[in-house]
Amino acid sequence: MDFNFSEDQTMLRDSVARYLQDRYDFDTRRKVTQSESGWRPEVWKAFAEELGILGAPFSEAQGGFGGGPIENMIVMEEIGKALVVEPYLSTVVIGGGFLKHSGYAGAGELIGSIIGGEAVIAFAYAEPQGRYNLADLKTTAKKDGAEYTLSGQKAVVWGAPWASHLIVTARTGGGQRDLGGVGVFLVESGAQGITRRDYPTVDGSRASEVYFETTPAILIADDAYPLVEQVVDEAIAALCAEAVGVQRKLHEGTLDYTRQRKQFGVPIASFQVLQHRMVDMFMNLEQSVSMTYMATLKLGESAEERGKAVSSAKVHIGRANKFIGQNAIQLHGGMGMTDELAIGHYFKRATMIEGLYGSVDHHLKRYEDLSFGKAA
């Protein structure tokens, strides 16, 4: 199988890397995350107008570049290297995924707004009792004329403080954990009946607890559990690519530090036991690359094959994040956890990625269920 990028894909990677290297250095990023807003809308606009990356995975008919999951993978790895906080994952990968796959009549217009940088989307799916079960929903949707109203609570909605729209999962029928009766809704962030509690996350991003009280919403898709699972799988594959970028920086930063740090008059990189450990870090990184490629390439296959590939990748990524991150911190000593040193921020992001959209244990169980034909 050919794993080489096309010329266009290579140009996409290089242009994103150059932009972020020039304008998203670590000190700038740290100041942004500590600011009141927590992000830079001008950078988001530059993603749309200067780089055009917000249109990378959309078809030319939709106003995009005709790309897909591989383009998302390329962009997300560069986002991981720079610890970008702007919401590419929730807006382009998840929001764009629902709009592309749902058949929603207004999808074209909203996709155009995403590509142009006007629309920012947050995905409100998790609930306090739900753990990682996408069907465990207490949020309800009731028909109100031609529209619906939502009532309920969503937890840890990433990027909600910046969002113009929310994509919300809610129950239109069935029991609390039934796979049937799961609806997907589009809600404007300023709609009546929304209450939001915003807070910073440990990795420098922003999230919200969101409460709906008879909030008007537009139905995108009903009986949509397979759609939700598909889009979340696409998000996990993209998240794995981000993790690869984070792991690269953890490994590179550790190599650089051990070549500079001296003990007994020589760089600690010359100690054989540390060389072995850094080789183990590199092997975990290379396996992460391979698993991410596999998951991305299998997104277009059957739900079972896609799910197994994505869960396999997420399991390895979670373990590799922990191994590479903890070794990076240990080899840096106490400096590794200081706010002034980048390595600690990469470790925090790696730790957060491990739990997003399912932990190692969750995806091991999911892989087992898919492999032996158990219910989702």
Image (cartoon, rainbow, N blue to C red):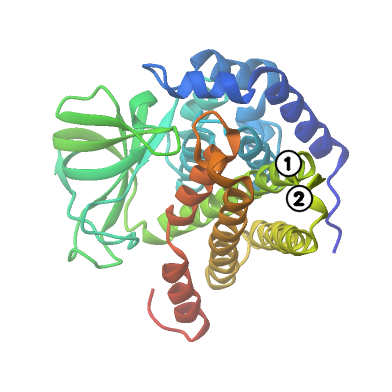
Q: Image height check: is 97 above or below 327?
A: above
Which element type, helix, strand or loop, lies under badge 2?
helix
Quadrant of residue 63 within the rendered picture: top right
The residue that disc 1 covers is: 261
289 or 98, which is in the foreground? 289
Q: Residue at x 48, y 19 (%)?
A: 32
The residue that disc 2 covers is: 268
Residue 2 x/y as whole percent: 86, 58
Q: Which mark is residue 13?
A: none
Q: Is 268 positioned to the left or the right of 358 in the image?
A: right
For marks 2 and 1 on the same chain, the one whose residue lies earlier in the sequence: 1
Q: Is 169 positioned to the left or the right of 175 in the image?
A: right
Residue contact at pointers 2 and 1, CB within 8 angstroms: yes
The quarter in which the C terminus is drawn is bottom left
Which element type, helix, strand or loop, lies under badge 1?
loop
Residue 141 x/y as whole percent: 18, 46
